[in-house]
Amino acid sequence: NSARFLWKCIPNSTKEGQPELVAVWAIGQRLWTRDYAGVYEAFHGFDWSPDIQALVSTLTGMFRDFAPVMNEFPNC
């Protein structure tokens, strides 16, 4: 819930001016709803800047490793 509250506090002008912020929020939304296929789509569906690309690649790898575990324990 903290992430949703933070998102609501960010001014729309900031969101509109930061497409990577919106893309990160899309990942968070999919994680919140346990839409794991959507998480992959969100990771790969945006042209990340070089500054963020290394982080996104690392997170994608971590998610790929943990996704099978998350699917086996859906209530956690």
Image (cartoon, grey):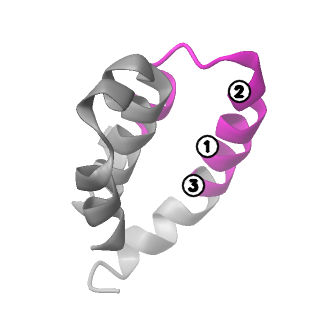
Which quadrant: the N terminus?
Answer: bottom left
Pointer 1 local density, CA inside 10 Å: few below 14, some 14–19, many at least 20: some
Residue 70 pos. (x, y %)? 43, 72
Q: Which portion, as a residue range, is magenta?
A: 40-63
Contact? badges 3 and 1 (CB < 8 Å): yes
**Secondary structure under badge 3?**
helix
Image: 6 above or below 2? above
The residue that mark 2 highlights is 53
Contact? badges 2 and 1 (CB < 8 Å): no
**Secondary structure under badge 1?**
helix
Residue 15 visible somewhere in the drawing: yes
Pointer 3 local density, CA inside 10 Å: few below 14, some 14–19, many at least 20: some
The residue that mark 3 highlights is 63
Three-letter code, disc 1: Thr
**Who's the residue at 58% across and 51% down the image?**
64
Q: Relative to the observer, which residue lies in front, 2 or 42?
A: 2
In this picture, residue 71 sits left or right of residue 66: left
Mark 2 vs mark 1: which is more N-terminal?
A: 2
In this picture, residue 71 sits left or right of residue 54: left
Q: How far is mark 3 from mark 2, CA to CA?
A: 15 Å
Q: Quadrant of residue 51?
A: top right
Three-letter code, disc 3: Phe
In this picture, residue 54 sits left or right of residue 21: right
**Who's the residue at 60% across and 19% down the image?**
48
Pointer 2 local density, CA inside 10 Å: few below 14, some 14–19, many at least 20: few
Q: Residue furthest bottom?
A: 76
